[in-house]
């Protein structure tokens, strides 16, 4: 009933001057005024979205929250055409894509944030596995189970266009105690994209606050846009070069293991190791973990299921 009253009030406000004949009954008033109000709303709906999409509509976005739906994606795109340096503060005022994330939980730790360490201040080593196991998607969760059995938490950065087809893989990895972050929608090099393409690559796909840009390539623009939608960039300190091929074959597991073993202490303390789901890196994991433990390092601990929000500082 209060809804009808609201409509009635709004209808009266909008149409008071047009009504010359007093209405006889409350029911008639409700029907007529509500009817005209709905008609006005139906007409106004699209223009309201577009009005809010323009700069200055941010307050409306907040008030309507996730209910803004399709209107919600437009404001930031419009802002993207503004000069660089204005993107982050303005973008931060808008709800993230689909209202899936809570930016308030994930302020970009601008000062002192070490993206190569992903905010890892634990002293331990974080394993990360990127991309997708193209010929065998379930390989990801088998690796996840193996690491879980060893008490190790890893970070998986999945290409979203594949991960979105297998939502159970993300769910299982988190249930296994791993972090699952975004590796963008389709693995394009972000620094080469237009502002709109950049938005699309970052916003489509997995909700979450952890982003690994393809090729680790994120400049000020990409970092700001990511921050504006609540994502922080996470790169690595040790590249295993598992992605390199010679004569059509990826580096073998033993070479990958050796690369990690011979990395410096600085790269290992609070370090992050880069490997891929499609390479021989998964086969090198047990050896890598054994070597690191033999060298006196500790792996990030698996303390149970995770969510799409990775804490900062990253205590693992
Ligand atoms: Zn990648």
Image (cartoon, rainbow, N blue to C red):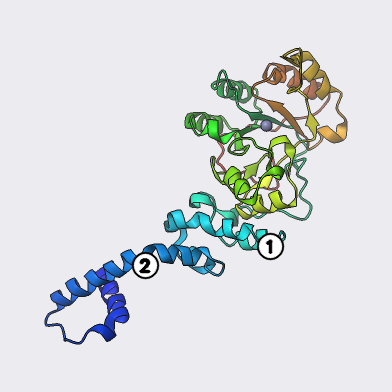
Work out whether residue 66 can be spotted: no
* Residue 311 badge: none
Q: Quadrant of the N terminus?
A: bottom left
| Front in this rendered view, residue 34 or 255 | 34
The verdict on label 2 being within 8 Å of ligand 1 is: no
| Residue 122 percent coordinates (x, y) | 74, 40
Q: Nearer the viewer, residue 205 or 52?
A: 52
- Are the residues flagged by discs 2 and 1 in contact, CB closer than 8 Å? no
Q: Position of residue 135 (x, y in %)?
A: 57, 18
Q: Nearer the viewer, residue 28 or 190?
A: 190
Against 28, residue 265 (above or below) is above
Element under disc 1 = loop
Residue 44's label in the rendered image is: 2
- Residue 285 sits above or below residue 88 on the image: above
Note whether residue 264 is visible.
Answer: yes
The answer to whether residue 278 is left or right of residue 36 is: right
Residue neighbourhood size for the residue with mark 2, other residues' Cα within 10 Å, grouped as few (<14), some (14–19), many (≥20): few
Q: Nearer the viewer, mark 2 or mark 1?
A: 2
Image spot of residue 129 (x, y percent): 67, 29
Q: In this figure, which residue is indicated by the disc labeled 1?
A: 86
- Between 46 and 119, the one nearer to me in the picture: 46
Q: Which quadrant, please, contains the C terminus? A: top right
Task: Say which residue appears at 68% left-offset and 62% top-offset.
Answer: 86
Between disc 2 and disc 1, whose residue precedes? 2
Answer with the quadrant where ligand 1 appears in the image: top right
The image quadrant of residue 83 is: bottom right
Q: Secondary structure at mark 2?
A: helix
Query: What is the CA distance from the residue labelled 2 to the residue labelled 1?
Result: 30 Å
Within 10 Å of the Cα at label 1, are there few (<14), some (14-19), or many (20+) other Cα atoms?
some
The residue lying at 66 percent from left, 59 percent from top is: 87
């Amino acid at each position: 009933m209060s809804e009808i009253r609201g409509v009635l009030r709004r209808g009266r406000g909008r149409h008071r001057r047009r009504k010359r004949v007093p209405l006889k009954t409350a029911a008639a008033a409700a029907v007529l005024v509500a009817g005209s109000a709905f008609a006005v709303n139906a007409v106004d709906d699209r223009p309201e979205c577009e009005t809010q999409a323009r700069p200055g509509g941010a307050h409306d976005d907040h008030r309507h929250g996730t209910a803004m739906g399709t209107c919600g994606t437009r404001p930031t795109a419009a802002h993207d055409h503004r000069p660089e340096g204005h993107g982050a503060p303005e973008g931060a005022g808008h709800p993230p894509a689909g209202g899936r994330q809570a930016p308030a939980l994930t302020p970009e730790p601008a000062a002192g944030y070490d993206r190569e360490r992903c905010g890892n201040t634990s002293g331990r080593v974080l394993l990360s596995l990127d991309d997708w196991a193209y010929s065998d998607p379930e390989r990801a969760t088998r690796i996840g189970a193996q690491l879980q059995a060893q008490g190790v938490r890893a970070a998986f950065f999945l290409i979203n266009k594949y991960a979105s087809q297998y939502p159970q893989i993300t769910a299982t990895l988190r249930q296994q105690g791993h972090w699952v972050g975004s590796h963008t929608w389709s693995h394009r090099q972000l620094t080469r994209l237009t502002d709109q393409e950049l938005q699309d690559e970052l916003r489509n796909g997995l909700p979450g606050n952890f982003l690994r840009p393809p090729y680790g390539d994120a400049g000020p623009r990409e970092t700001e846009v990511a921050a504006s939608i609540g994502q922080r960039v996470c790169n690595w300190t040790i590249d295993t070069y598992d992605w390199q091929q010679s004569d059509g074959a990826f580096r073998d597991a033993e070479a990958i293991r050796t690369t990690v073993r011979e990395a410096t202490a600085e790269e290992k303390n609070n370090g992050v190791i880069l490997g891929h789901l499609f390479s021989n890196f998964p086969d090198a994991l047990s050896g890598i973990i054994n070597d690191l433990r033999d060298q006196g390092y500790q792996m990030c601990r698996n303390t149970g299921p995770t969510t799409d929000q990775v804490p900062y500082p990253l205590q693992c």
